[in-house]
Image: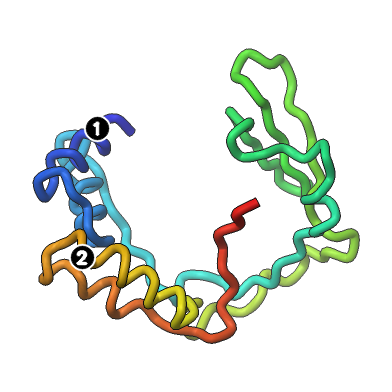
Amino acid sequence: MYSVLGKICGCCAGNVYDFEDFSTAVASSNSGNMDVITMRNEDFRNLKSDVSQAKLKAPNRPKLADIAQVKFVRGKHTLFYKSSFSEESFTEFSFLKKSHKCTNPGPLRTSPRGVTSEKKKLIIAKLCPLMPENRRTFWKDLPENAAAEDLIDND
């Protein structure tokens, strides 16, 4: 990880403007012994979220900032986590709906998830002025989808 961060700081005068810059920095880390596989949209499944909103609002739920280590166990549909590396055992947290069935992984994606046009305009307005003109293509070509859910939760 530190090798990648060092390459990112050295890449493009310390600026990583787009996914291509990030891939280049990762590939050149670890003395160039890093294979970068750029996944395409078709490599992902179009999964339906079965996360229970009630369980996520529970007062005892773990927050990302408080998690030091996470473990997933085949056959279990729960999250195992530690708040510090020194903890002896993992705490189990159930975050899926009771109706969740893990039998069908869902179809492969046929199109990018995208972002709403409002979100894209906001990204372009705030981010693009900070980078050279020739590095803005990635952001200007972001796919748009009016039904895209915003993945940033500001709670």
Residue 75 picture location, percent across and down:
77, 49
What mark, if any, has residue 68 been given in the picture?
none
What mark, if any, has residue 3 been given in the picture?
1
- Give the answer, above or below, for where 43 lies relative to 57: below
> Which residue appears farthest toward the right when viewing the image?
98
Tell me how far mark 1 sits from mark 2, CA to CA. Answer: 29 Å
Structural crowding at the residue carrying mark 1, measured as other residues with C-alpha within 10 Å and reported as few (<14), some (14–19) or many (≥20):
some
Residue drawn at x 25%, y 46% is 26
Name which residue type carries label 2: Pro
Residue drawn at x 67%, y 27% is 82
Q: Quadrant of residue 153?
A: bottom right
Residue picked out by circle 2: 129
- The quadrant the N terminus occupies is top left
Q: Quadrant of residue 60?
A: top right
Name which residue type carries label 1: Ser
Structural crowding at the residue carrying mark 2, measured as other residues with C-alpha within 10 Å and reported as few (<14), some (14–19) or many (≥20):
few
**N-terminal label among 1 and 2:** 1
- Give the answer, above or below, for where 83 lies relative to 34: above
